[in-house]
Image (cartoon, rainbow, N blue to C red):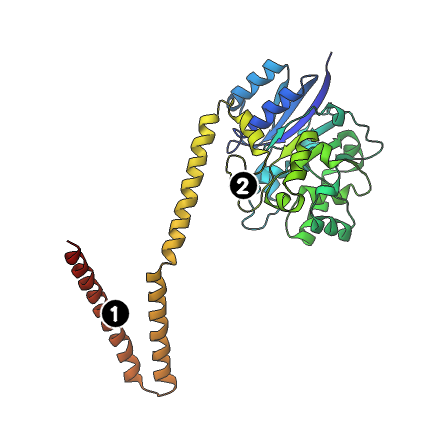
C-alpha cells in the first residue's frame, strides 16, 4: 500500500493549462506515493481539469479543487502597482485554517511554473522535529533577501517545495496571526509576500534542506549570480526546477531569454494536450511584444523628435519676446512664421522626393 502525499498548488482559468507540466511531472515522478493534489483556485471547475483528472486516474492519484475567495483575500493583502502576482498566489495564508480538510496534517507546496524532476517522498516524510516548516536552505537566495530577513528578525523561507506541519500551525497560530504578520511585512517591504510573512512568523522554527538537492530556481538573476555550470549541476540533484520571474514575466512558454531547464519543461509540454495552445500563445505574446516595440519606435522616430524640437524652440522664442523684449506683437508673429516655415519645408520635401523618383525612373 502506497503512503499518502498531500501536495498544494494554486492556479486558475487564466494559466491552469501551463500547470499541466507541473502536474504530469509530479504524478510521473511520484508513483511510489498516493498523491492527493489540492488545487486551490477561485474559478476552476472539475470540467476544466478533464485531462488532469485522466492523469490522476492513470497514475492512481487524486485531484481535489479547493475554492479560494480572491475578493475577500484582496481586502487583507496588497501588491505594488505593476506587480504580476495574482491575489490567488497568496492563498497559502488561508491554507491551514480555512482551505485544507481537517485530516490533512502535513502538506508540501509546489507551484504551477515548475517541473518536478525527482521523487518528493523523502522530503515529504522528513521529520519536522518541532519546526513549523521545512524548505530548501537560503544559500540560493539573493544577498539582499537574506540581509532583509536578518534585519527584520526573520528567517529565509523558500516557498516552492516547502513543507508545513499543518496541525502544529493550526494549534499555535490563528489566521489573524498570519494576516497581522503580513501587515508588518507590508509596512516594511511595501507589499504582501508569502516568503517574508512565513519567514518572520516561523522564525527559529524552519528546518533547512540542502538547496542544490531540493530546488533550483532558473531565471535571469540566478543565471547571473550562480552561473550556467552550477545550475546545470543542480538539475542533476534537485527534485524540482522553478521558473520564477520578475517584471518581464519570463517563463518557458514566454522565453524572453533561455535557461537550461526550459528544455526539461518543453519535453513534458510536447506530450501535453495543450501543446498547440502553448505554441500559439507564444506567437501571440511575441506579436504583442513586437507591436509594443513598434509603437515605441514610432513614438521616438526622427519626425517626432524634430517636431518636439521645433515646438520647443518656438516656445523659447515666444518667451524671449515677452520676457526680455516685452514685444507682444513679436510673440504672436513667431508661431505664425514658424508654421509657415514648417509648411514650406514639407512642400519642399515633397517636391525633392518627387524629383528623386522621376530621376530614378
Closer to the camera in the image, 80 or 77: 80
Q: Residues within 10 Å of mark 2 (few under 14, many from 20)?
A: some
Label placed on residue 342:
1
Q: Position of residue 346 (x, y in %)?
A: 23, 65
Q: Which mark is residue 32?
A: none
Residue at 73%, 41% (x, y): give it.
157
204 in relation to 109, above or below: below
157 lies left or right of 343: right
Q: Does label 1 or label 2 sit earlier along the sequence?
A: 2
Q: Position of residue 230 (x, y in %)?
A: 68, 39
Instruction: Find residue 1 and report its horizontal and vertical position in percent.
Output: 74, 11
Residue 63 in the figure: left or right of residue 254: right
Looking at the image, which residue is at 74% across and 51% down? 147
Residue 269 position (above or below residue 248): above
Q: Report the residue marked by disc 2.
A: 250
Circle 1 — which element? helix
What count of labels does the image hold? Answer: 2
Q: Secondary structure beneath disc 2?
A: loop
Between the residue at mark 1 and the residue at mark 2, the CA separation in whole angstroms equals 45 Å
Quadrant of res 86: top right
Q: Position of residue 308 (x, y in %)?
A: 36, 67
- On screen, residue 232 above or below 179: above
- Which residue is at a point 41% across and 43% down the rendered structure image? 288
Amino acid at each position: 500500500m502506497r503512503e499518502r502525499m498531500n501536495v498544494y498548488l494554486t492556479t486558475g482559468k487564466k494559466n491552469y493549462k501551463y500547470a499541466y507540466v507541473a502536474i504530469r511531472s509530479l504524478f510521473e515522478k511520484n508513483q511510489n506515493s498516493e498523491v492527493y493534489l489540492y488545487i486551490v483556485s477561485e474559478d476552476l471547475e472539475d470540467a476544466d481539469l478533464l485531462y488532469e483528472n485522466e492523469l490522476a486516474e492513470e497514475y492512481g492519484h487524486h485531484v481535489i479543487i479547493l475554492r479560494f475567495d480572491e475578493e475577500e483575500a484582496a481586502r487583507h493583502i496588497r501588491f505594488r502597482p505593476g506587480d504580476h502576482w495574482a491575489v490567488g498566489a497568496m492563498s497559502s495564508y488561508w491554507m491551514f485554517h480555512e482551505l485544507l480538510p481537517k485530516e490533512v496534517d502535513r502538506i508540501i507546496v509546489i507551484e504551477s511554473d515548475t517541473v518536478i524532476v525527482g521523487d518528493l517522498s523523502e522530503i515529504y516524510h522528513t521529520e519536522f522535529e518541532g519546526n513549523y516548516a521545512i524548505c530548501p536552505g537560503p544559500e540560493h537566495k539573493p544577498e539582499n533577501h537574506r540581509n532583509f530577513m536578518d534585519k527584520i528578525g526573520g528567517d529565509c523561507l523558500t516557498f516552492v517545495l516547502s513543507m508545513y506541519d499543518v496541525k502544529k500551525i493550526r494549534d499555535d497560530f490563528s489566521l489573524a496571526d498570519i494576516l497581522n504578520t503580513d501587515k508588518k511585512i507590508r509596512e516594511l517591504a511595501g507589499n504582501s509576500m508569502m516568503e517574508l510573512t512565513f519567514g518572520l512568523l516561523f522564525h527559529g522554527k524552519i528546518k533547512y534542506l540542502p538547496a542544490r538537492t531540493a530546488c533550483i530556481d532558473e531565471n535571469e538573476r540566478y543565471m547571473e549570480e550562480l552561473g550556467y555550470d552550477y545550475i546545470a549541476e543542480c538539475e542533476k540533484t534537485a527534485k524540482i526546477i522553478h521558473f520564477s520571474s520578475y517584471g518581464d514575466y519570463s517563463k518557458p512558454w514566454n522565453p524572453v531569454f533561455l535557461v537550461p531547464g526550459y528544455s526539461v519543461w518543453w519535453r513534458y509540454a510536447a506530450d501535453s494536450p495543450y501543446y498547440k495552445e502553448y505554441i500559439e500563445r507564444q506567437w501571440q505574446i511575441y506579436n504583442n511584444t513586437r507591436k509594443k516595440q513598434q509603437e515605441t519606435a514610432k513614438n521616438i522616430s526622427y519626425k517626432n523628435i524634430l517636431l518636439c524640437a521645433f515646438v520647443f524652440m518656438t516656445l523659447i522664442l515666444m518667451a524671449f519676446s515677452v520676457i526680455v523684449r516685452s514685444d507682444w506683437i513679436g510673440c504672436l508673429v513667431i508661431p505664425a512664421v514658424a508654421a509657415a516655415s514648417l509648411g514650406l519645408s514639407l512642400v519642399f520635401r515633397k517636391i525633392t522626393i518627387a524629383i528623386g523618383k522621376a530621376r530614378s525612373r
